[in-house]
Image (cartoon, helix red, strand yellow):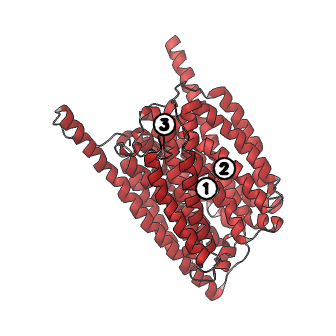
Amino acid sequence: MNTAAAADTHHARTGLALGVIVIGTLIAAVDTTIVVLALPKIQHSLHAGLASLTWVIIGYLLVITLLAIQVGRLGDMFGRVKMYEAGFLVFVVGSALCALSFNVASMIAFRAIQGIGGALISANSGAVIADTFPPERRGRAYGFTAVGWNLGAILGILLGGLITTYISWRWVFGINVPIGLIAFAIALRVLVDPGERQRRKLDLVGMAVLGLGLFGILWALVQLSTTPLDGAITAALIVGAALIVAFGLVEQKVREPMVNLSLLRAPTLAPTLCSSLFQAVGTFAVLFLLTMYLQGVRQLSPIHASALLVPGYLIGALVAPLGGRFADRVGAVIPQTVGILVMMAALGFYVALGTTTSLVILVAGTVVNGIGSGLFYPANNAAVMRASPPGSFGVTAGMLRTFANTGMVFSFSVAIFVASRTIPRRVAFAIFVGTTKLSGRTGALFTHGLHAAFGVSILLLVASGILSATSVVAHRRHQRSLAVATGTESEPSLPTCR
């Protein structure tokens, strides 16, 4: 009886712990979609230029990208639960400051603070799950975090339209304050730190070199979206690329590098992380492209445009737990790769969109994409954490976020650059932030630009799918090496969860 009671208590606590992690994911997702819909109001209220307004989104993602591994390392040093809980507080402070922004510079600075909180939450959430759940149950747990992401995206879309239309854009950020405080209070009560600690050092030099390199390339891409290529943009591209190369060299010299290249030798880890990178580059900007199409070409209001995107996120929320269980049963490679193929099919729907195409096709594409994302994300998360050495969950989770967030940052810039090639750049940029609309021949030309952007996304997903599939090869090579070392002659089987 005591054993049964203890088991019930354990299951209840792990269920509540998972609930807190899902809330953290939900908050991050809300903030991603809700801010997009608020951009026109923010621009008007703060008198922001189009290029500077872009950094409201890119700056937030860039901070998370640079800090993901560092704060994951802090989790290994001082406790992943503590860092996760601290993330809620920092995110709440950043959100409150964003709501009080007085110009676009202050908004970008406060979004950076919000990004620090987002990094603490996202980089440590995967590690907390790895600490809380055994390997055979992690896929299901990651599936529920995907539910949180999809539900948060839905809430962000709906609340963004309602708040910006009927209240004030400032409440787009203010709404995070009570939600974040509630989540923090629950986390204090239900999350348990395993007590394991690892001695780590922060790689500040590597972070600075990578940050400057990414900033240079991103600044150049943003400028190219509004102005022609010139000497300053060319210099920024060259210097940014050189710094990223230098980052790789620095990481080989640092005692505890930001990107631990030795971890990439773990079977299946490198191809799985790179698959996440290419998947993010290919798909993160799809939401922005569809918003541009619906508001710019089809001339829908933000709230009507956003409503058409809800079904895909809803389906993704329903499929994700099933995808996680599927990954637990058959291994991560199959659902991860199938998810990529399904997302490619969804992009095929979007390529068929024209100036008068039935919007049913767009909704069908979002539903198909939701199925693909529901299969991919839980499997990809489980695969990365499965490949991680047990004492490095925090660093590995941070590496996953760094790879994925780097993809997100570049997805946004590349998509806008490709989509804007058929009409004047400033017009395309104004469409993105919802300050202008298109009709007639200009609308048709811009639709062709969107088709090109979706085509690039398909190619990037092809690369992601190939990398996902090659993790099978990496695993089998590792198994053969072990067989040679131990004298075992049995044929290696597929990994149960990668």
Does residue 156 appear to the left or right of 168 in the view shown? left
Q: What element carries label 1?
A: helix
Mark 3 Cα-neighbour bin, 10 Å: few <14, some 14–19, many ≥20: many
Q: Mark 1 or mark 2, which is nearer the start of the sequence?
A: 1
Q: Mark 1 or mark 3, which is nearer the start of the sequence?
A: 1
How far is the residue under mark 2 from the one under mark 1? 8 Å
Residue 69 placed where, x, y %?
Answer: 54, 44
Instruction: Report the residue marked by disc 2.
Output: 115
Quadrant of the rendered structure where residue 415 is? bottom right
Q: Which of 122 and 162 is in front in this view?
A: 122
Determine contact: label 3, label 1, CB under 8 Å. Answer: no
Res. 62 mark: 1
Instruction: Report the residue marked by disc 3.
Output: 393
**What is the three-letter code of the residue carrying label 2?**
Gly
The residue at the far front in this view is 253
With respect to residue 317, does 234 lie above or below? below
Does residue 368 appear to the left or right of 18 in the view shown? left
Determine contact: label 2, label 1, CB under 8 Å. Answer: yes
